[in-house]
Amino acid sequence: MVLDLFIAMSPPAVEQYWSEVRERKTWVLVDKTLIPRIPGHSPEALAIEATRVAEEEFDNRVFANMVLLGAMAAFPGWIALKAMEKSLDGQIPASALETSRSALRRGFELGLGWERK
């Protein structure tokens, strides 16, 4: 199996699944807060300090996954940010919905400009 996209939030995930990441075929997105050493890869991995951003900007590290999903929406041709925001309706508790949307938007901002080379 060849992965189109690999999102990692822990070193064990990198260790377990890195063998399925392919040069020039797999986009790699990692939480740099939790994975300080990223294996070399082409295209270069997009490393975002998602957990740090979630803790500092949203007061809860649980929003790190939304930050990474927002960054994924910035990848050309994947999924529109608006579609991702809409998909949260009915899936996220109302008390966390606006923060989840804000975390998605923040991740999108962090992911802009990253290009597959």
Image (spheres, rainbow, N blue to C red):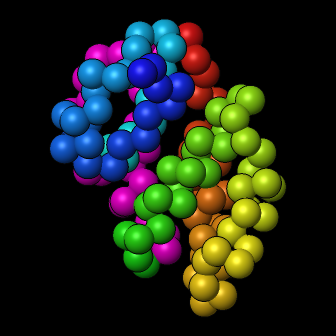
Q: Residue at x 53, y 25 (%)?
A: 4
Residue 53 in the image, given as x and y percentages of width and height: 44, 60
User: Is residue 56 magenta-colored?
Assistant: yes
- Identify the residue at image location x=79%, y=54%: 83
Q: Which residues are magenta?
A: 33-58
At horizontal 52% and vertical 56% (from top left) the residue drawn is: 67
Image point (37%, 21%), residue name: 21
Q: Percent from the top left, x then y, of residue 51?
A: 37, 59
Position above or below: 25 against 87: above
Q: Is residue 14 left or right of residue 95?
A: left
From the viewer's perspective, is residue 33 above or below residue 74?
Answer: below
Left or right of 92? Residue 30 is: left
Residue found at the very far bottom of the displayed protein? 95
Residue 100: where, in percent of width, then height? 60, 71
Which quadrant holds residue 105? bottom right
- Residue closer to the observer: 78 or 17: 17
The answer to which of 79 and 54 lies nearer the viewer is 79
The quarter of the image holding the C terminus is: top right
Query: Which residue reaches farthest front?
Result: 1
Pinpoint residue 29: horizontal percent, then vertical percent. 45, 36
Regarding residue 35, the answer to whether it shows in the image is no
- When the figure is inspected, residue 65 is found, relative to residue 78, above or below; the finding is below
Q: Nearer the viewer, residue 78 or 35?
A: 78
Q: Quadrant location of the N terminus?
A: top left
Q: Taking the image as drawn, is residue 10 in sight?
A: yes
- Magenta includes 96? no
